[in-house]
Amino acid sequence: MQTRLKSGISKPNKILNLLAITDIATNPTTYKQAVQHPHWQTAMAEEIQALKQQGTWSLVPPPSNKPVLGCRWTYKTKMLPNGSIDRYKARLVAQGFTQEQGINYTETFSPVAKIATIRVLLSIALTRNWPVSQLDISNAFLHGDLPDDVYMKQPPGYSDTHHPDFICKLHKSIYGLKQAPRLWFQN
């Protein structure tokens, strides 16, 4: 197969501006760090509100015979092309690495488009002057209905005051679950 490297074509070296790499330093790695800043508190509140609007989970007493997944927050500062801050994004992620096949998930396969296929489609659209649109759906990954019984601890900082010992029974997929990509594709 003829590749760019075999043809002597290489990507140009990126010149990094060390002054612009403040994004990594500003993103907290733990809930304890994030809760100290109002903009991260707002981002977490928006994420929790979106999860509640979707009906992602309901609080139930912990079952004795089912494993309970942990969860954690991830944080990312979204930047505009000019380098200014667009928004702060907090995402609640289930710790799906502890899931066991046959207990809290069955299948994970989801078809994925290869980048070469996308390039071909964009090339055809360009040569034929077809309009190309992009669609961004907020929290699209969270729309898949969850057929398996999956239980998760309450999110850090957002435990129910009336039922602090209850856990979340997931009704919709959430980031981090092994079956989440499959459920998203089925939707």
Image (cartoon, rainbow, N blue to C red):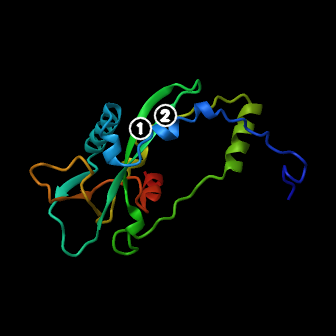
Inter-mark Cα distance, 2 to 1 = 7 Å
Q: Which residue is mark 2?
A: 78
Q: Are marks 2 and 1 in contact (CB under 8 Å)?
A: yes
Whichever of labels 2 and 1 marks the residue nearer the N terminus, that label is: 2
| Amino acid type, mark 1 | Lys
Q: Residue at x 56, y 58 (%)?
A: 111
| For residue 93, side relative to residue 154 (left or right) | right
Residue most toward the left?
162
Disc 1: CA contacts within 10 A as few (<14), some (14-19) or many (>=20): some
Q: Residue at x 64, y 28 (%)?
A: 131
**Could you say where residue 89 lies in the image, as x and y percent from the top left?**
41, 38
| Amino acid type, mark 2 | Lys
Q: Which residue is mark 1?
A: 89
Please tell me which residue lies in front, 17 or 91: 17
**Could you say where residue 11 lies in the image, as x and y percent from the top left?**
79, 42
**Could you say where residue 73 lies in the image, as x and y percent from the top left?**
36, 49
